[in-house]
Amino acid sequence: MGSYVPSTKEERREMLEAIGLKDYRELYQDVPAEMYLDKPLDLPEGMSELEVSHAMNAMASKNRVFSTVLRGAGAYDHYIPSIVKYIPAKEEFLTAYTPYQAEMSQGVLQSIFEYQTMICELTGMAVSNASVYDGATAAAEAAAMCRDRKRRVTLISAAAHPDTINTVRTYCYGTNDELRIVPVKDGKTDLDALKEMLTADVASFYVQQPNFFGQFEDCTAIGEMVHAAGAQYIMGCNPIALAIMKTPAECGADIAVGEGQPLGMPISFGGPYLGFMAATQKMMRKLPGRIVGETVDAKGERAYVLSLQAREQHIRREKASSNICSNQALCALTAGVYMSAMGPRGMAEAANQSMAKAHYLAKGLCAIEGVSLKYEGAFFHEFVTVMPKAEEVLAALAEADILGGLPVEGGILWCATEKVCREKLDETIAIVKEVLGK
């Protein structure tokens, strides 16, 4: 490591003498001797750029990329306009760092400000932050926002995404708070159970809309129930569905969160994604991360600044309600470009087509003997079918270059987006029919 330290050997010797040491190894005297690296690492010889390119391409070729994707469960294959990939790849955005110096960061600050504005328009909420790591983190951070001295319990619907439930559980474990799971009835949150579980120690309730099974929850009724119990209401939303469904604000939510991946980010092995967060004016000062605002400079011209950021997140971490210190700025920029390129009409069209094609697929599958919907409620672009020979069906679809739905308890969770053409949906139905007819 010494070669990376900007000081001479003599300067390092003087610093060691000042603290009573002779060698830098004495700084690590508490580390077991067997952990020391006393010989060079067994690394292969370096390769040329061409050799590295061949090696990386060989590794990439092992990935299976399906031409048709009928699987969602948190990562969705939507159409992405070419401009969405081009603008975030520009060097001035790709290499940008945290915009602490506003006068040097106007472009990045404006991109974040525009993103926040569009998230507020999409959710109907008063204020949005500059995004957090992913949708599950956003849900956990929202739950942390709602806790106080008297109310330390978080409720979450069992119909939420399993990864979201586990992330909220991890946050609760870290702060020694309690998480209680509200059971599911017929694919949706059991409202009778929720009413009983909304006790005086409950800080908030989180519901996903549409939920993990694709079902639409009665979010307005849930909001009224949660507020009647004195708790805060958190809605986790699919941003594409928000283009056509009631906004969280219209449902009475205090905080709206979600995974921003459908907003221009391609599906990939784990990201990078972004979690969006928006809240009412009352909850603004509890939002984690940072909020970019618009002001005027000394010449009276429009300028952008970091308006709100809790310093406890950096220098008094033990007193902070959140330790989120960064944001997914490049992903937020991507989402902002996507929403700008698509516009309200384009996003609504993507949502309507996704829902229409999912219902077409569901109708075709359920016309096959032995296949039926597991849940009868209204759904967006995902649904669960009871499916015999599930493994054989998915294997046959994979042979036809179609990624089928996700196996879940009691069936298969299917998804359709605007990218899937009718011919591929008909082909999927025909393959399932052939497999089950054997």
Image (cartoon, rainbow, N blue to C red):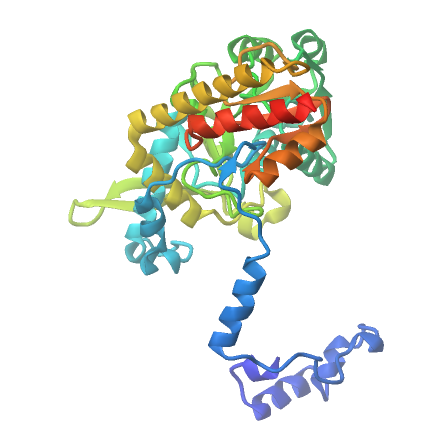
Q: Is residue 136 visible?
A: yes
Return the x and y of residue 66 as percentages of the image width and height: 53, 42
Q: Is residue 246 left or right of residue 371?
A: left
Return the x and y of residue 8 as percentages of the image width and height: 54, 89
Count of numbered badges drawn on the protein: 0
Quarter of the rendering containing residue 375: top right
* Residue at image point 76% right, 84% down: 38
Quarter of the rendering containing residue 114: top left
* Residue at image point 61% right, 15% down: 368
Return the x and y of residue 405 as percentages of the image width and height: 60, 30
Quarter of the image where the N terminus is located: bottom right
Q: Is residue 373 above or below residue 52?
A: above
Q: Is residue 213 left or right of residue 193?
A: left
Q: Is residue 58 left or right of residue 418?
A: right
Quarter of the image where the C terminus is located: top right
Of 132 and 400, the residue lying toward us: 400
For this orientation, the residue located farthest to the front is: 438
For this orientation, the residue located farthest to the left is: 299
* Residue at image point 38% right, 57% down: 94
Q: Is residue 394 left or right of residue 48?
A: right
Return the x and y of residue 116 as percentages of the image width and height: 37, 36
Q: Is residue 76 above or below residue 152?
A: below
For this orientation, the residue located farthest to the bottom is: 10
Of 431 and 210, the residue lying toward us: 431
Of 125 and 237, the residue lying toward us: 237
